[in-house]
Image: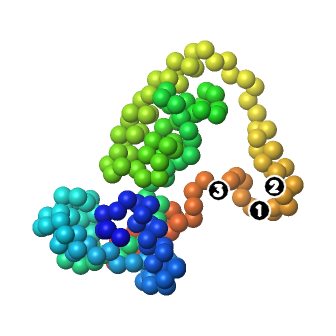
C-alpha cells in the first residue's frame, strides 16, 4: 500500500499482513508492521514528512526517532471514532426526535475516512448547529416524566438472553483504547 493511504486502507493492509500472511512484528500488545517512512521522503522529496504529517514527525522526534530516516512501528488502534448517529443539517438525529449530536458520535459526515485535520472543524461547525437548534427546540418542548425504565429493560434483555455479567451498561468503546493509553505511557517512561 502507499504510505499515505486513507486510514481504512492502511488498517486493513496492516491487519492482512499480520493475520493473513503472518508477517507482523510482535509489539507486546498485538502485532504491528514497520511503516517505511523513509520511502515517503524518497517518493515525495525532502521535507515531505514535515509538510504532510508534521504532528507525527514531532511526536516521534520527541522520543529520538527521526522518521525521515528510520521506519516506525505501527498497528491499528482507535484514532478517531466515526460514530453511528445519523443527523440532519440541524444536528438532530434522524431517528430520535429532540436528540441533537455533534462530534465523534455522529456518523456519515466523512463515512469511514475522516479527512485529515477536520475533526475539530466538525465539532465546531456541527456543534454550533446542534447547539443553536437544540436551544431553539427546547423552548417548545415539554419534558415528560423522567425514569430509569431503560435500565430495567436492559437488565431484562440480558436475563432473557441468559447473559450474566458484572457490566452495568453496554460497552461504548473497544478495549484497545485503554491499551493505546498503556502503550503511550510506556513510551513516555522509556
Q: The C terminus is located in which quarter?
A: bottom left
| Residue under the point 32% across and 74% down | 35
What residue sits right under mark 2 in the picture?
158
**Label 3 SS:** loop
The image quadrant of residue 70 is bottom left
Q: The N terminus is located in which quarter?
A: bottom left
**Label 2 SS:** helix
What residue sits right under mark 3 in the picture?
171
Contact (Cβ within 8 Å) of mark 2 with mark 1:
yes
Residue 66 visible in image: no
In the rendered image, residue 139, in percent from the top left (x then y), is placed at 57, 15
Which circle marks residue 114 in the picture? none
Residue 122 to residue 99: above or below: below
Considering depth in this image, is 28 or 22 the residue closer to the camera? Answer: 22
| Residue under the point 48% across and 29% down | 89
In the rendered image, residue 142, in percent from the top left (x then y), is placed at 67, 18
Considering depth in this image, is 101 or 179 the residue closer to the camera? Answer: 101
What residue sits right under mark 1 in the picture?
165
The numbered mark, 3 or 1, whose residue comes first in the sequence reads: 1
Q: Which residue is situated farthest in the top direction here?
A: 140
Q: Distance from label 3 to label 1 (Cα)?
A: 12 Å
Q: Distance from label 3 to label 2 (Cα)?
A: 13 Å
Amino acid at each position: 500500500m502507499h504510505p499515505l493511504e486513507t486510514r481504512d486502507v492502511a488498517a486493513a493492509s496492516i491487519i492482512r499482513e499480520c493475520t493473513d500472511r503472518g508477517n507482523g512484528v510482535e509489539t507486546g500488545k498485538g502485532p504491528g508492521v514497520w511503516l517505511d517512512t523513509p520511502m515517503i521522503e524518497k517518493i515525495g522529496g525532502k521535507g515531505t514528512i514535515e509538510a504532510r504529517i508534521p504532528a507525527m514527525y514531532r511526536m516521534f522526534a520527541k522520543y529520538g526517532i527521526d522518521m525521515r530516516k528510520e521506519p516506525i512501528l505501527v498497528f491499528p488502534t482507535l484514532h478517531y471514532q466515526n460514530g453511528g448517529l445519523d443527523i440532519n443539517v440541524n444536528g438532530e438525529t434522524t431517528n430520535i426526535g429532540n436528540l441533537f449530536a455533534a462530534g465523534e458520535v455522529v456518523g456519515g459526515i466523512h463515512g469511514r475516512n475522516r479527512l485529515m485535520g477536520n475533526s475539530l472543524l466538525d465539532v465546531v461547525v456541527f456543534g454550533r448547529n446542534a447547539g443553536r437548534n437544540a436551544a431553539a427546540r427546547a423552548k417548545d418542548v415539554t419534558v415528560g416524566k423522567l425514569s430509569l425504565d431503560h435500565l430495567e429493560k436492559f437488565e431484562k434483555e440480558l436475563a432473557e438472553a441468559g447473559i450474566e455479567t458484572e457490566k452495568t451498561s453496554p460497552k461504548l468503546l473497544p478495549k484497545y483504547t485503554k491499551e493505546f493509553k498503556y502503550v503511550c505511557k510506556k513510551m513516555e517512561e522509556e
